[in-house]
Image (tube, rainbow, N blue to C red):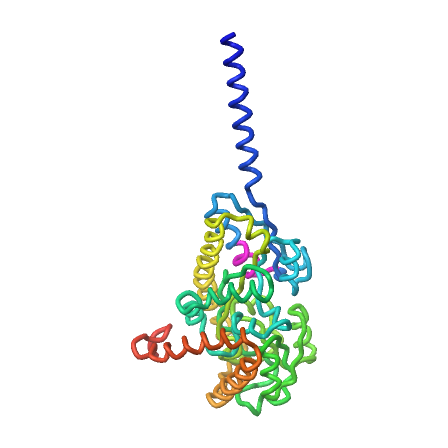
Amino acid sequence: MKRIKKLAVAMMVTVGLSSLSAVAVADQKRWRMATPWSGGPWLERDAKLYADRVNQLTGGDVSIEVFPGGTLGSALRVTNTVTSGVAQISHNYINYDYGSDPTTALLAGHSSGLTPEEFMLWMYQGGGVELYEEYRLDKFGVVAFPCAILGTEIFLHSNKRVETLEDFQGLRLRTSGAWSELASRLGASTVVMAGGDIYSALERGVIDAAEWGSPEMNRPTGFQDVAKYVILPGVHQSGGFLECQVNSRAWDSLTSEQQEILRLAGKLTVYETWLASSFADLEAYQALLDGPNEIVQLSPEFIATIMDETRKWEDEYAASNEWFARVLNSQREFKEKMVVWTDYRLPIGGVK
């Protein structure tokens, strides 16, 4: 009789442990991450780094599989892929939703003059990250936060020398988003095309010039091989962020601790991608200096004109868009505080 009781107890313990194991497995999240990226650092480094950090910090309770652009839905409609639940999470560029609301340009980065370092300060100390999450949830129904930094871009890879506003007139320019509007206002003839079409368009003379990304991002495209001039600085996109979006139902299935871990993973990967991309940009830009391209610096007068036109454009949207005004006012207040920065900080790169 005692033996039977012992066997019964053992069976109950085994069943109990099996049940606990099943619950633990059921609680594990296996998420799909949609991206717009077909390859390159934003996919292979940035998106996968965030997925790795989430898996690491949650002890495997939330694991994320990263998919290239177009695998789970349209590469330029990643927000739809997340809201529909096809993917629980994304690694995305918020400015791809510019057509729905121009406020996205302020959060992605535009010709505001904010550098990557200033953007990080505003985001994490100036109230930006709270605005970001509130805005995305209110307007698009997703939970979103920054999870990678964007470096200052190259202004143009161009077959025409561009230094002044006069040089910019009639330039057949491939661009997108807010800069497409602003460049048109400044006299360029703008063309929107997919990234994969830019090389051949430059080579065949369909366009005169194109903007795409930072030195690191542009290097593998080969734009420098088919366009003589490299135009600097990238005042059209002085800095910005990539984001991670989470489906609201998937977000609600997480514990509050897991939610905070996902936010912290985003902050960590912003820092890590800033280190990696900034260092990679140094080598990529040196390769341009050592190569056959001619490096051209925009005139101070043209830069001032761009900034003036940007402010007019901002004021026009702020007058009719409440969210645009909220984010813009926050950024402008931050920029006012930054005026004294150069009084006590040396420029990055040292004194020349």
Residue 118 falls left or right of residue 246: left
Q: Position of residue 140 (x, y in %)?
A: 60, 64
Using the image as rendered, state which of residue 143 and residue 97 is in the foreground.
143
Which segment is the magenta one? 39-48
Image position of 350 with respect to 244: above or below? below
Residue 172 in view, yes or no: yes
What residue is at 58 percent from the left and 39 percent from the top? 26
| Residue depicted at x 44% and y 57% | 268
Choose between 347 and 262: the one closer to the eye: 262
Q: Quadrant of the C terminus?
A: bottom left
Give x and y (percent) for residue 32. Answer: 61, 51
Q: Does the magenta segment cover residue 47?
A: yes
Task: Give left or right: position of 270 versus 347.
Answer: right
Which residue appears farthest toward the bottom when viewing the image?
166
Residue 290 visible somewhere in the drawing: no
Does 70 sit above or below residue 184? above
Compared with 122, 83 (above or below) is: above
Count how many numbered circles sit on residues in the image: 0
Residue 237 lies, in percent from the top left, at: 52, 75
Residue displayed at 54% across by 16% down: 8
Residue located farthest toward the left when viewing the structure as drawn: 344
Q: Which of the 4 image quarters holds residue 28?
A: top right
| Residue 196 on the magenta span | no
The answer to whether 85 appears left or right of 155 in the picture is right
User: Who is closer to the viewer here, 8 or 64?
Assistant: 8
**What secondary structure characterizes most of the magenta part?**
helix
| The image quarter in which residue 346 lies | bottom left
Residue 165 in the image: x percent, y percent?
55, 90
Residue drawn 61% across the image and 75% down it: 177
